[in-house]
Image (cartoon, rainbow, N blue to C red):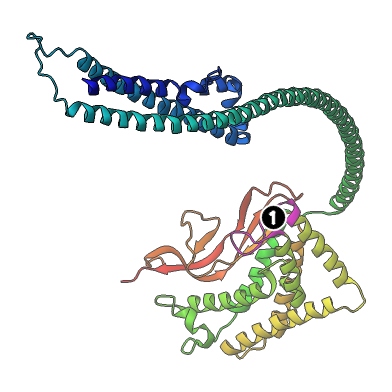
Amino acid sequence: MGGCQSAPERSTSSGGQNDSSPIHAIPEPPRKKLSLGTLRKGYTQHEERPSFQERHASVIAYVQRLEEDRQNYENQLRRPKHNQEEIDNIFSSVLGSVANWNPYDQSARREPPEPHIIPEYIQMLQKKLDEQCRYSSALTTSIAELKAEMGGLRGDVNAKTADIVRLEKKNIEDARTCEAKIARNTASHKVEISRMESSYSNTLQDLEKAHSAKVQQMQRQFDDTSRNARDEHNAEKSRLQNALLTTVDGFKPMADRICRQQLEDLRGSIHALVFGLDNLRQEDPGPLRSQIAMIRNPQNKDYKNALEGCFWSIIFRGMFATPFCSLGEYGDAFMDTWTGLFGKGISYQWPEADTRSETWRYVTLEAIEQDLKSSRPSNLKSSYEANRQSVISSLSSLYSQVSPENKSREIRDVVDKACQLALAFGKQRCRLQVLAPQPGDPIDAKDEDAYFSLNHSSDRVIPEVQLVVKPGLLKVGDGRGGSFGSSVNMSPSAVYLKIVAN
């Protein structure tokens, strides 16, 4: 029983010690509980701003760490308090059991504890209580230190909060400054835009005025230039027309009858020279061999036709191939100039007949004729005479091969007629072109004004030139130098047509 009574005293003393423990001896000062939400109220409107997070990220992290530490400390304070209450309940239950134990109470459900166990049990409980008190004392000391640290942290938080408030005010001031600066810049920008628009408008007006003045000046210059050019053109046109009229008035074109008559006169002279041969050597035709080979069953007339064709071939090349060929080497230069100025036509390598090309031709030949008629010597005369002698020499050589007779005077007369006729044709305002078709050229058999055939009546022929005996004469335009789109055959060519092979 004594042991049972001492246990409550211990419990009482232990309880006294517990009441005098540092937990109850140091009153906890009232403090204002702060949370992270409370601290965030000061910078809620700033925490979403990227600029604030970038500039004050360390402050935000520091405040969050303080909140976590405070929560951990509160959880540590709750655990000792809970353990102490549990021990007090157990100890009170044990004391109650010992004090209220009645060994004579038959209704007790539990058996009384062993007397020798109770002191040990009480001693164990006292030991645990002492350990808990020591732990509580150490915990109280830690709490005091933590409170001191919390005080320091609160100071830091207050300082950081003050910094946040200061930064918030600074941000507001900076925002206001920026807004004012933006407003000033906007106003300045509007003023500058207005100034630039005004300057641009003024510059554009000046440019338009300058452009308009320049256009008017250029228009006046163009009008003056056009007027002067038109006046010069009209004056030159009048001069040329007067010169042309003077030339036309002084020129007497050859009538078509005269043209045909002079060509037939030349033809007759050549024909008489050839057909006047009585002893043409048919057994050895010599230079006529290739021509005679083109004629089937040649007769004496065919031999003379072939010889006449050879005469005409020499005369044509020397006098009528071009309007200038009677001039010799100088004629080639004039022909090159003529085709170089006006181009080559589709046929015969002459330029297409028009007013410009034909005017150049007859004006040039008129001047050449004046030079040929003058008494002073010239290279042109020498070239003309050399070509004349060359044609005479070629005809004499050909004639001597087929006949021993001397026909030098007749040949010279023929060449002189050809020279005079070539110059007379070249001076005409129309184009008079002596035509000698080439072997193999197709012809229109129905066009009797262009060709007539010398074949035997029994020959089966095709419309293709085999041999040319006499050239024809083509007239393009009229006698006054117009109507170059029309042409007429004034004299047909005499040809042998190709014979159909058996």
Q: Nearer the viewer, residue 121 or 462?
A: 121
Closer-to-camera residue (212/185): 185
Which residue is under mark 1? 257
Q: Quadrant of residue 335?
A: bottom right
In percent of the image, x 51 and y 83: which residue is there?
A: 288
Query: What kind of secondary structure does the magenta stretch mostly adopt?
Result: loop
**Up/down of 502 relative to 474, above or below:** below
For the C terminus, the image quarter is: bottom left
Expressed as whole percent of the image width and height from the top left, the position of residue 196 reads 83, 29
Which picture quadrant has residue 276?
A: bottom right
Which residue is at a point 62% across and 52% down the rendered structure image? 488
Q: Establish if 16 lies above or below 289.
A: above
Q: Residue furthest front?
A: 2
Residue 188: x percent and y percent? 82, 26
On whether residue 161 falls in the magenta region, the answer is no
Residue 104 drawn at (x, y percent): 10, 11
Is 346 one of the magenta-colored residues? Answer: yes
User: Residue 407: x and y, percent?
Assistant: 67, 85
Q: Is residue 327 left or right of residue 94?
A: right
Determine if residue 430 is in view: yes
| Residue 158 sits above or below residue 299 on the image | above
Which residues fall within the magenta stretch? Answer: 342-357
What amino acid is at disc 1? Answer: Arg
Location of residue 481 with respect to 163 vertically, above or below: below
Residue plotted at (89% across, 38% down):
218
| Horizontal side, residue 55 vs residue 228: left or right | left
